[in-house]
Amino acid sequence: MLRILFILSLLVNSAVASNWSDPSPWFDIRKQRIQQLLPDAMQRADIDAWLILCRENNNDPLADHIGCENAGSLAVFMFFFADNGFDSIAFSPIGEATALAEMGIVNNVISVPRGESALDVASQFIKSAKFTRIAVNTSSTNAQADGLTHSQHIALEQTLGASLAKRLVSSEELVYQWLAIKLPEEVEIMRQAAELTEKWQREAYATVIPGKTTDADVAQFLKMKMAEHGVTDAWAPDQNPNVNSGQDRGHSHATDKVIMPGDVIQTDFGIRVHHRWVTDIQRFAYVLKPGETDPPENIQHYWQSAVEGRNAAFAAMRPGVRGVDVDSAQRAVMQRTGSEHVMWSTGHPVGYVAHDTGPNLGGSQSPEVRPASQRKLRAGMTFAFDGFHSWLRDDGTFKTISVEDMVVITDDGAEFLIPPQQSLILIPSSE
């Protein structure tokens, strides 16, 4: 038995090592993002300098995007435009300064001796630089741009003084412009992860025995695949994957409901690879009843309507189009095909988190809820989006097909990361 366990351990470790374990490409990619994408983001946001305060235990959400994930005592990172172009500097406690300089993320590292404040040293630099708009991480709408705590904000204003403090502005627009665009190398990683995400979903459906297998069993199979390959959850672990063969439940956990003939099964599943990039893909299956070789006519209609809605949304995606316009394209199909109302947006940005920074593909039903739906798509943005069709079931509850795929916006349209689902996955009856 011990020998068997040892062999299994080697196999699992080998699988992990050959897939998504460290070393991660993130450390090189983030340097590219800083050099290639951040200057343009700052110019689009009309920002002279971006200041980020980093510390241990309760760090800024973007700390590891700029290289200060290992901060101990307070460190100050700045990215700015100088006479010689785009530049960067870090004011770091002496204990971390040497290692930080070796990483080569910022152009200059100023070592701050013990007993001195990095914020005090940074303020002297800021006072001599004549910046007019200094972005700091405060935002009421984007948690990724809201890392500056109340106490840090007070300390920053006091250190800079009243005159300079008036030049502090929210980094919300800068962070939006920066995070919303992904490099081609990142898109390729997400493409490979998407292939794995869908592959496992299809394998999970192949394990279903109608009348015996539960939604939770299917979810557990996917959790097992994640563990074997060294990847983690794209969102809250208790709700990933969401396997649902019953009525609509929104974002939720899989239950012990037994999968039965005639059920339409939704699996909403995402993985995180290299501890960084995530996927968000839904695949749908139909459980054939005894004697059936294809889904009945009504189920076929629901499915084809959802696919048509997805295709309409996809066709609408191109640079310069607003997120709300993509949503409207699908809503027109839903109205024509008789879909019940669906509260969810057609789609959302995806990348570093499942609901990432960028335009929301929604808003045509409730624009005040989704202000980001007025934003325009740009090449390099990545989205997860659904094709919807919802209907009223015999028991008075609603069921929605929301076939979900991932795309990247190109110079002249959109491109699926992996082939979209074109037909329902059919699960044979156990009888």
Image: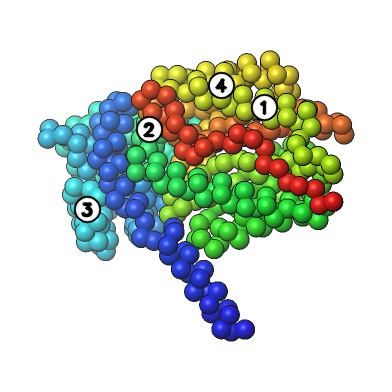
Q: Position of residue 41 (x, y in %)?
A: 31, 31
Which amino acid type is shown beneath numbered disc 4? Ala
Q: Which mark is residue 312?
A: 4
Number of other residues with Cα within 10 Å of mark 3, as a class: few under 14, some 14 to 19, many 20 or more: few
Its colouring scheme is: rainbow
Which structural element holds mark 4? helix
Q: Residue at x 50, y 20 (%)?
A: 316
Which amino acid type is shown beneath numbered disc 1? Gln
- Residue 91 position (above or below residue 126): below
* Nearer to us: label 3 or label 2: 2
Q: Residue at x 60, y 21 (%)?
A: 330
Specify which label sits upstream in the sequence, 2 or 1.
1
* Nearer to us: label 3 or label 4: 4
Circle 3 residue: 104
How far, Cα to Cα, is label 4 from label 1?
12 Å
Number of other residues with Cα within 10 Å of mark 1, as a class: few under 14, some 14 to 19, many 20 or more: many
Query: Which is nearer the eye, 122 or 389?
Result: 389
Circle 2 residue: 380
* Nearer to us: label 2 or label 1: 1
